[in-house]
Amino acid sequence: MYKAYCIDDEPLVLEDFMNNPLFADSGFILAGCQTNPVTAAKEIQKICPDVVFTDLKMPTMNGVELTEKLRGKGVSCEFVVISAYPEFDESRRFFLMDGFDYLLKPVSDQDLSQLLSRLAAKLARKKPAQYFPTEKLPPRLTKIIAYLAADIAAQHSVNSLCEEFHINRSLLNRLFLQHLGISPITYLTTLRMERAAHLLRNSPLDIKEIAAQCGYKDYFYFCRVFRNHYLCTPTAYRDSPG
């Protein structure tokens, strides 16, 4: 699982955010949290998380200043800034430091789920999975994988898989992480991206139709996920040789 670290000067906000089950569903664990950004900067250098979620407005040091400080120390993890207000100057500084995303409060489950899916896909390219199937997969996992592959356009979710296979969230996540090294949602995203790449190269369908066939109702979100997965737009991928 990928390690997440979270910083917010409001303890209740911090607790609610990091107790959200969407993190575990997407393959993330809480490696640390802090209300003091100065202390957080020291802990992050020791813990080496894969991603840091930081509030923007905090006393002593704001989220962008924290990102600048850690980048200056050679910390190469992903950063996500969360703010109650859109601030152009701060967001521009953040993205100039290769920040991953800038979310506005209150963060909805849909926004968080989409961000975590994109984040996991990017981290999977940076940090290959540590677990690989070296033996026959458990029958239950094999059935779930076949079920996903049979209809990748369906609106699958962790909850729908749990209901379909009469399994709890914890066991579902553990099956995928232990045997495949990724979460169920990241696995589904990978299936969809592979199908999209195949269709782009081997079918005359336009990109909106391909997005729909791969389970994405939102065309622009599909393009965003594809770009994060293949490091180019669907159009550029289709036009590229071989």
Image (spheres, rainbow, N blue to C red):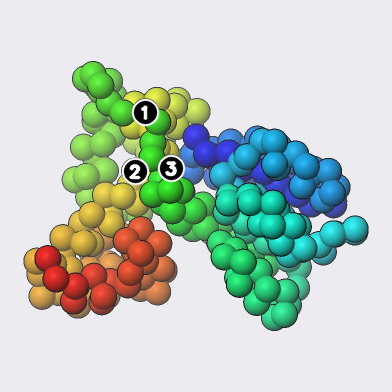
Q: CA distance from mark 3 to mark 2?
A: 15 Å
User: Which residue is label 1 attached to?
Assistant: 131
Say which amino acid is labelled 2. Answer: Tyr
Visible residue check, residue 168 = no
Query: Who comes first in sequence, dot 3 or dot 2?
Result: 3
In this view, the mark in front (1 or 2)? 1
Q: CA distance from mark 1 to mark 2?
A: 13 Å
Residue at 50% of width from left, 28% of height from top?
Answer: 170
* Residue nearest the viewer, comparing 157 with 22: 22
Q: What is the x, y in percent for residue 212?
A: 27, 67
Q: What is the x, y in percent for residue 158?
A: 43, 41
Query: Who comes first in sequence, dot 1 or dot 2?
Result: 1
User: Which residue is label 2 attached to?
Assistant: 187
**Along the horizontal axis of the image, is 201 left or right of 136?**
left
In this view, the mark in front (3 or 2)? 3
28 in relation to 8, above or below: above
Q: Does dot 1 land on a helix, a strand or a loop?
A: loop
- The residue most toward the right is 60
Say which amino acid is labelled 3. Answer: Lys
Residue at 32% of width from left, 61% of height from top?
Answer: 230
Q: Does dot 2 land on a helix, a strand or a loop?
A: helix
84 in relation to 29, above or below: below
User: Which residue is label 3 attached to?
Assistant: 127
- Where residue 29 sits, quadrant-wise, is top right
- The residue most toward the bottom is 88
Say which amino acid is labelled 1. Answer: Tyr
143 in relation to 91, above or below: above
Residue at 61% of width from left, 72% of height from top?
Answer: 96
Q: What is the x, y in percent for residue 14?
A: 76, 47
Residue at 63% of width from left, 50% of height from top?
Answer: 75
